[in-house]
């Protein structure tokens, strides 16, 4: 008689722990609690249970893998979550249902699961440990179907791909096709075809694209695009529709449009911008001001349901990487007929807004229009005009000065109502022609940038009001109030630095706090922490207001070339302007708007992560050439594994716990500090330290620092807050 696996298991004198635990898990997974005797009987099969089986089962229970209730029934605790793998070989499983209670997974229990995989984890509670521990039992969904890495000869013949991210597996890709000219060191993208759960079995795949030599210009960013599933290419059908569009505005396109081609209308953008989708005009009136915000009428060219429209909806947004733009729409539109290039007629949707002498809005009118931008201005030019150091021509200078006056009025009103004005500088990466970073500097932001921002905010609020007034199926930009838990954590953080925040929180109280910390060493730390404590803005069909802007009604209208929600708003508005929506059109749009809002929100988050990763990758490359150099830094984060520090050029990195001065360092999560038990010294947020570049991993975008030997921890008491004179901005 042939023995089955359970029979062999029962007869063995020693139980293989891994095989046995997997059998127990299979019996109990997704099952209600089962009596111990029934579980043991099923494991033994037709044979009598041995002492070895009882011992192995008892070990699982005592180690915490089995939960036993008062009736003597046992069960297993499991979760489904996202695996975060540490480069040192262990991981954590995180899930939104168990915030702050991540499951630690030792390296021996990871199986073949890799970073960002959705996994099933078997959880146990171990007395004396800070949190639950687990073992991966299955991969519910792989995070990556493609992998980018370096070609290398396989010892057994053929080729393999060594991943850029060492948290990913080595992939066997077989032999090169004739004429492929593969060689060691070439950077490639491969599609994984076989990914076994058993980590001892090889992962296999196929090379689907050769990206180039590792040091060739743009290869690193191209690799990031593959990892982030970003494509700069459009399908043949999309390009065919784009090519069929006219090169210039035709007479028949002007029907029903307000002709504004003789008005003084200008665009103001960065010097390297090509997709110019907004223009402004401003006039003084007897009652105050009339502001015109003229936005490219992209919806006129991108009709609903076309290949162009579906592709734009799928992309959701343009992505601005460190060295290139991945457009939402083909360049024929984004840089051509839909771009408000100077001295060329362009179709637009205009928001006319009447303001009183204090900048308060008194009237709104939305119209389909045609403009001809008189000047393509840059932020630098306008900043110089507003500063009085540059003259362009008298009429233009007068309009820009008036626009600056309106900007001041709008900004004052926005601050007065309590809008949270984050003053977080961004890092600007200066690249050589070969794509290598030659400098990292804070990105300057002057009055011109603020002027355009205020005008766009004004238009977005006005359009949101029109959508609500006419009960149109609009897509609103929603920003909910921060959660109590997040705000309580933020209060603890600022309390450790000597600041207070009243309850309940309001945009006004947050703005008061940001003004209080302005100019202090901890300013950026508190700004960043507050930003992380806020909920992320999203798109939705129901207007619930924008907390951060202290705005009761808000939508995105001003960037239809690069954001699909703006294109949606344009389409709804222009259809309404042409004729009232009938019940059939309204129902169609209402059925679709929720889905569009959710997908646009998701694409926006993905784009932001890709943009951040591309900058951090170049920052790491920049610091790789500066190993051993010394810098002044500010502690920007404190954790139980070390301190994060930020340099004056905004580059951030980690000083690991083991690299701190010799002491027994204890993490104080309430006061966000590390305290040495032996010396009583502390490292805390906002503290200035001197650091040395100790290690860089460009692929993982990670920079490690060590403290300079002379850098000392602070005394064990909160820093005194020096009174500073307030600076007007």
Image (cartoon, grey):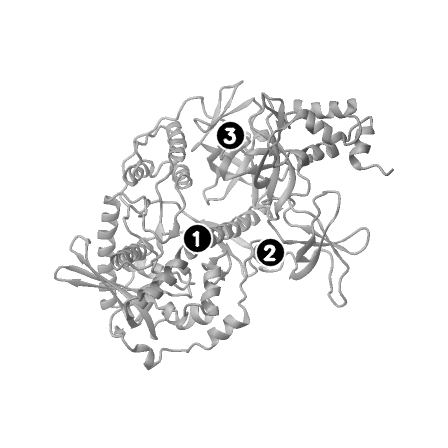
Above or below, 280 against 622 in this view is: below
Q: Secondary structure at mark 3?
A: loop
Query: Can I make out residue 364 in this image?
Result: yes
Residue linked to disc 2: 223
Instruction: Choose between 75 and 190: the one closer to the eye.
Output: 75
Image marks 3 and 1: residues in contact by CB distance under 8 Å: no
Q: Secondary structure at mark 2?
A: helix
Q: Secondary structure at mark 1?
A: helix
Where residue 53 appears, as percent x and y from the top left, is: 76, 26
Q: Rate crowding at label 1 as few (under 14), some (14 to 19) or many (20 or more) other CA atoms within 10 Å.
A: some
Residue linked to disc 3: 711
Residue linked to disc 1: 598
Q: Can you tell which of label 2 and label 3 is closer to the viewer?
A: 2
Q: Residue furthest bottom?
A: 251
- The first of marks 3 and 1 along the sequence is 1
Residue 341: name its quadrant.
bottom left
Residue at 33% from the left image edge and 72% from the top image edge: 347
Where residue 723 appears, as percent x and y from the top left, is: 30, 31
Residue 659: name its quadrant.
top right
CA separation in Å, label 2 and label 3: 38 Å
CA separation in Å, label 1 and label 2: 27 Å
CA separation in Å, label 3 and label 1: 48 Å
Position of the C terminus, as image quadrant, is top left
Instruction: Choose between 685 and 146: the one closer to the eye.
Output: 146
């Amino acid at each position: 008689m042939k023995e089955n696996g359970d029979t062999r298991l029962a007869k063995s004198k020693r139980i293989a722990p891994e095989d046995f635990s997997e059998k127990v898990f299979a019996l109990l997974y997704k099952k209600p609690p089962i009596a111990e005797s029934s579980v043991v009987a099923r494991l033994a099969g037709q044979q009598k249970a041995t002492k070895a089986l009882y011992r192995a089962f008892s070990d699982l229970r005592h180690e915490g893998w089995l939960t036993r209730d008062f009736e003597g029934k046992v069960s297993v605790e499991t979760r489904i979550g996202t695996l975060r793998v540490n480069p040192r070989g262990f991981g954590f499983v995180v899930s939104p249902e168990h915030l702050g209670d991540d499951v630690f997974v030792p390296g021996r229990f990871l199986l073949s699961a890799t970073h960002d995989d959705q996994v099933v984890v078997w959880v146990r509670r171990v007395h004396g440990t800070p949190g639950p521990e687990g073992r991966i039992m299955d991969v519910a969904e792989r995070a990556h179907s493609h992998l980018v890495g370096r070609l290398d000869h396989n010892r057994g013949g053929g080729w393999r791909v060594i991943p850029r991210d060492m948290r990913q597996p080595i992939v066997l890709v077989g032999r090169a096709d004739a004429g492929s000219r593969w060689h060691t060191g070439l950077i490639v993208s491969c599609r994984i075809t076989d990914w076994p759960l058993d980590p001892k079995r090889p992962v296999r795949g196929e090379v689907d694209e050769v990206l180039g030599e590792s040091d060739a210009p743009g290869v690193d960013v191209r690799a990031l695009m593959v990892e982030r599933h970003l494509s700069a290419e459009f399908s043949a059908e999309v390009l065919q529709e784009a090519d069929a569009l006219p090169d210039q505005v035709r007479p028949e396109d002007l029907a029903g449009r307000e002709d504004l081609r003789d008005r003084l209308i200008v665009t103001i953008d960065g010097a390297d911008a090509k997709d110019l989708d907004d223009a402004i005009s401003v006039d003084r009136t007897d009652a105050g001001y009339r502001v015109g915000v003229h936005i490219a009428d992209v919806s006129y060219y991108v009709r609903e349901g076309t290949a162009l429209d579906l592709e734009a909806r799928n992309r959701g947004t343009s992505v601005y990487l460190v060295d290139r733009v991945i457009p939402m729409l083909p360049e024929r539109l984004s840089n051509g007929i839909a771009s408000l290039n100077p001295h060329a007629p362009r179709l637009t949707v205009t928001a006319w807004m009447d303001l009183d002498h204090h900048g308060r809005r008194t009237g709104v009118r939305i119209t389909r229009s045609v403009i001809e931008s008189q000047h393509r201005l840059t932020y630098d030019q306008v900043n110089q005009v507003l500063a009085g150091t540059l003259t362009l021509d008298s009429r233009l200078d007068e309009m820009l000065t008036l626009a600056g006056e309106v900007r001041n009025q709008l900004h004052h009103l926005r601050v007065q109502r309590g809008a949270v004005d984050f003053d977080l500088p961004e890092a600007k990466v200066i690249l050589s022609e070969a794509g290598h970073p030659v400098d990292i500097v804070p990105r300057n932001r002057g009055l011109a940038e603020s002027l355009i921002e205020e005008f766009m905010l004004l238009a977005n609020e006005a359009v949101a009001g029109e959508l609500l007034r006419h009960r149109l199926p609009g897509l609103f930009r929603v920003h909910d109030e921060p959660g109590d838990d997040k705000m309580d954590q933020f209060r603890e953080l600022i309390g450790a630095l000597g600041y207070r925040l009243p309850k309940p929180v309001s945009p006004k109280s947050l703005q008061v706090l940001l003004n209080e910390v302005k100019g202090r060493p901890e300013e950026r730390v508190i700004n960043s922490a507050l930003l992380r404590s806020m909920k992320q803005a999203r798109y939705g069909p129901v207007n619930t207001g924008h907390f951060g802007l202290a705005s009761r009604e808000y939508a995105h209208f001003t960037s239809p070339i690069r954001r699909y929600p703006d294109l949606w708003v344009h389409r709804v508005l222009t259809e309404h302007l042409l004729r009232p929506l009938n019940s059939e059109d309204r129902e169609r749009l209402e059925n679709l708007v929720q889905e569009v809002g959710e997908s646009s929100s998701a694409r926006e988050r993905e784009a932001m992560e890709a943009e951040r990763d591309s900058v951090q990758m170049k920052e790491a490359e920049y610091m790789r050439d500066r190993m051993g150099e010394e810098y002044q830094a500010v502690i920007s984060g404190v954790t139980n594994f070390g301190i994060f520090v930020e340099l004056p050029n905004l580059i951030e990195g980690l000083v690991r716990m083991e690299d701190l001065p010799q002491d027994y360092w204890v993490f104080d999560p309430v006061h966000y500090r590390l305290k040495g038990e032996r010396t009583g010294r502390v490292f805390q947020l906002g503290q200035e330290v001197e650091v040395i570049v100790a290690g860089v991993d460009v692929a993982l975008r990670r920079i490690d620092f060590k403290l300079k030997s002379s850098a000392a921890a602070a005394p064990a008491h909160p820093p005194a807050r020096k009174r500073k004179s307030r600076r007007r901005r």
